[in-house]
Amino acid sequence: MKASAAELERLLRDPKFGFALFHGPDQGLIRERADALTARIVDDVRDPFRTMALSGAALKRDPARLADEAAALSFTGGRRVVRVEDADDGVARLLEPLIADAVSQQRENAAFVVVEARELRPRSELRRLFEGAKIAAAIGCYADDATTLEPMIAEILAHDGLSASDEAVAYLVENLGSDRQVSRREIEKLALFMGATGTVSLEDTEACVGDSAATSLDELAHAVSAGDHTGLEASLVRSHLAGSDAVRSLRAVAAHFLRLHRAVGLAEKGRSREQAMAALRPPVFFKFGARFRVAMERWPRARLAWALVELCEAELTCKTTGAPADLVCSRTLMRIAHAA
């Protein structure tokens, strides 16, 4: 069946239920949920008699290994957990007879199989197998947003007697969320950085947390739309030092101009600039709010469309012509900034 993480508790009370697939773009959340499920079934997740981890690559070399491990009994008693990591559709053909056998035999204490996969298409064989079996469940694991990040931020900080200002929470939501385990480590690092009870400020958060590459790219995009040549040059240097390549820089600026295009379009239909900005998802980070409003005044939609074409052509040039990508990127961004 297709299930949510909240439904797992109900499913685990059914002794016939024995297969779970976690899939999606957030690998940290997949691992966190797989670990939590394993801990619900076995007392010690490190017990080699109760748990066994297999990789998708290992199963390609030895396909019979999965059936052998699923059929094995624990020397110490209790239900075993077999985890398949980095699975793909090739694993579906190995799991299909196991699920069919489990449906017909319904053996007590049969091993519980936990499968971890990356993002899968709806027509994926692995997804269809788990979603179509009554004793199996497929659970999607997607990037956190404000509704899931804010409670996690409050919980982790409260554990150390801390709270966070609204500005600090907004900054964390803006800069975290792509990977659950990375987000947890960043918030825990912030709590350690504070070192005592109190309130976490925006300054504390900026000093300790965040993807420096992503922050540099935000600064880069706003410098381009503002026509700030000095800020553009400095942001290009920072983003390069933080590990961003030319294509990533071009895409970050293009994403910014797409949001501007959307907001200007809403404003032309009668909404105020504030209403147009509020309609964007995710909303404009408050730190860049004033600069975004100014950019909306500077750029009509036709000019934004021209800039987007320039950015697309620059990315294509970087990928196909062999021209120096950094030079193509910087010249394109300077030309667009001049148009502001």
Image: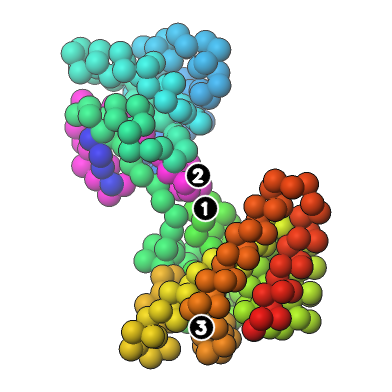
Label whose residue precedes the other's in the sequence (3 or 1) = 1
Residue pictured at 20% horizontal, 18% vertical: 103
Task: Indicate the quadrant containing the C terminus: top left, top right, bottom left or bottom right.
Answer: bottom right
Label whose residue precedes the other's in the sequence (3 or 2) = 2
Task: Indicate the quadrant containing the N terminus: top left, top right, bottom left or bottom right.
Answer: top left
Relative depth, front residue between 60 and 288: 288
Residue at mark 3 to residue at mark 2: CA–CA distance: 40 Å
Relative depth, front residue between 179 and 90: 90
Residue 169 in view of the camera: no
Up/down of 131 relative to 98, above or below: below
Q: Quadrant of residue 212?
A: bottom right
Q: Nearer the viewer, mark 3 or mark 1?
A: 3
Residue at mark 3 to residue at mark 1: CA–CA distance: 36 Å
Residue pictured at 67% horizontal, 59% vertical: 314
- Write the start and end of the magenta stretch as one range: 5-31
Relative depth, front residue between 310 and 207: 310
Q: Which residue is mark 1?
A: 179
Name the kind of residue labelled 1 in the image: Asp
Up/down of 200 relative to 155, above or below: below
Name the kind of residue labelled 2 in the image: Gln
Q: Which residue is mark 2?
A: 27
Residue at mark 1 to residue at mark 2: CA–CA distance: 6 Å
SS for tag 3? loop
Can residue 241 be found in the magenta stretch? no
Q: Which residue is mark 3?
A: 300
